[in-house]
Amino acid sequence: MATEPEKVAPPTEAPVAEPEKAAPPPTARPTDYFEVADVVLRLLVFASALVSVVVMSTSKQTEIVPIPIPPYQAPRSAKFNHSPALIYFVAAHSVAGFFSIITTLGSLYSLIKPGCSAKIISHFIVIDVLLLGIVASATGAAASVTYIGLKGNTHSGWGKICSLYDKFCRYLGASVGVSLFATIMLVLLVLLSVYSLSKKIPK
């Protein structure tokens, strides 16, 4: 009995591997202009605090003033360290300048690693509010001393000194003006930090 020939199956073709799709190029993270503005404002706070300290520290003037005993004239100096309010002013702005450098470095770090920016901003708000209170109070204290030197106070018997120590008073006025600018920058920083943090809170 003849056997039927075995059917040979046709060779199967090996599946052709599809070419791998190239990964899309990484897209650059969009620039966060609020973070850039934060860095700029902190640098402005540092610059204004430094200028205030330098101008106040160099506000020295010596003049010949009358005295009630012979020789009836003597040189008298006007310096910032003669007034506790002006000493507080220099100390407050030194602290503000120091912390503004630290927060500027932290703000730059948040630009490099945006994942930790929310935690950094939350700490910055506390520091900025404290610095705002310190700088604003120091500005008010120095401004009151400058105003008394300019106008005097007849009720307390405090005479005007700016007519004699004109250079000293100009330095005080300039330092207080720059300090007022630093106060405004700190207010903007607090508002900016609060707004930036509110944007990062998931809704």
Image (cartoon, helix red, strand yellow):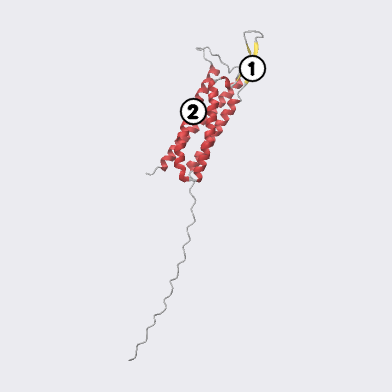
Q: Quadrant of residue 51?
A: top right
Name the quarter where the N terminus is drawn. Answer: bottom left
Residue 180 at x, y = what percent?
A: 51, 28
Q: Are marks 1 and 2 in contact (CB under 8 Å)?
A: no
What amino acid is at disc 1? Answer: Glu
Q: Is residue 197 above or below residue 146?
A: below
What amino acid is at disc 2? Answer: Ile
Mark 2 residue element: helix
Which mark identifies residue 134? 2
Q: Residue furthest right?
A: 71
**Foreground: 201 or 170?**
201
Give the residue number, with chain letter if any, for mark 1.
Answer: 63
Of mark 1 and mark 2, the one earlier in the sequence is 1
Mark 1 residue element: strand
Mark pair 1, 2: CA separation: 33 Å
Q: Residue furthest left?
A: 1
Residue 116 at x, y = what percent?
A: 46, 43
